[in-house]
Amino acid sequence: MFKIAELQFVAQGKDKMVYNHPEDSNKVIKVMKRSRATENGSRPPRSNIKNNRHQGIYREFRREMIQYLQLCKNTYAKNQFVFPVETVYGFQPTDQGLGLVVEKVLGPNGKLLTAYDLIVGEEFTNKHTIALKRFFDDCCKYQVVFSEVNLRGLMYTELRQNRPEFVMVDGMGEKVFVPWRSMSRSINSYNVRKVEARLKANHENLIQNKGK
């Protein structure tokens, strides 16, 4: 069991904390914030029935794991394991709950770099535009299901496959009871393109607000 106090902090979101894996520099460990859970691992103030059915605070881990397994299943004949989403390696017990071990996606400078960082830092160039378009095209191709995608959840790298690319590290997986997007490529592609249009609008708004 890893002790969180002994791990190097990397980043955090509304629900999760991210730490470097102490034994593998190519991986990080995601841990759900205890402040976001009840004693039985539910999400207040939701009902116990709903949380027990959906694994409570670990529901996000479940969605991400299932999404990655689905992608591997869909490309079984090709033995493919790298996709537009971070690679999932498994679970790791910690003194702050179960951790999800995933790939560490670093920018060309060896640091974390999101699409949001590139835009607000005025570093978003044509190669990033091409890489972002390829990301959405690949998500349609591989049938990656989006849940809550934003510019901060898309990491930029050139180290992963020796080319510019964006990798989704948050906001993936089916959230609804009937997984329509997992069952239908056309329905999922329609949703991917809607998200693409929304993020492009967010991109433009960030640029406009930057100049004010």
Image: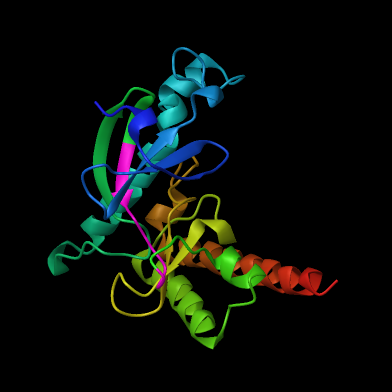
Q: Which of the 4 image quarters holds residue 190? A: bottom right
Q: Which of the 4 image quarters holds residue 2? A: top left
Residue 187, how many percent across, how many down?
49, 62
Residue 107, how many percent across, how many down?
42, 68
Magenta range is 100-109
Residue 31, how many percent across, how many down?
40, 34
| Nearest the eye: 108 or 180 | 108
35 above or below 39? below
| Nearest the eye: 119 or 77 | 119
Residue depicted at 37% across the width and 71% down the height? 141
Is 105 one of the magenta-colored residues? yes
Can I make out residue 107 in this image? yes
Residue depicted at 54% across the width and 43% down the height? 13
Residue 116, how many percent across, how many down?
60, 64
Can I make out residue 177 in this image? no
52 above or below 128? above
Residue depicted at 30% across the width and 69% down the height? 160
Residue pushed farthest top? 39
Residue pushed farthest bottom? 126
Q: What is the chief secondary structure element of the magenta stretch?
A: loop
Is 193 one of the magenta-colored residues? no
Quadrant containing the C terminus is bottom right
Give the left or right position of residue 185, taking residue 47 as reference.
left
114 above or below 180? below
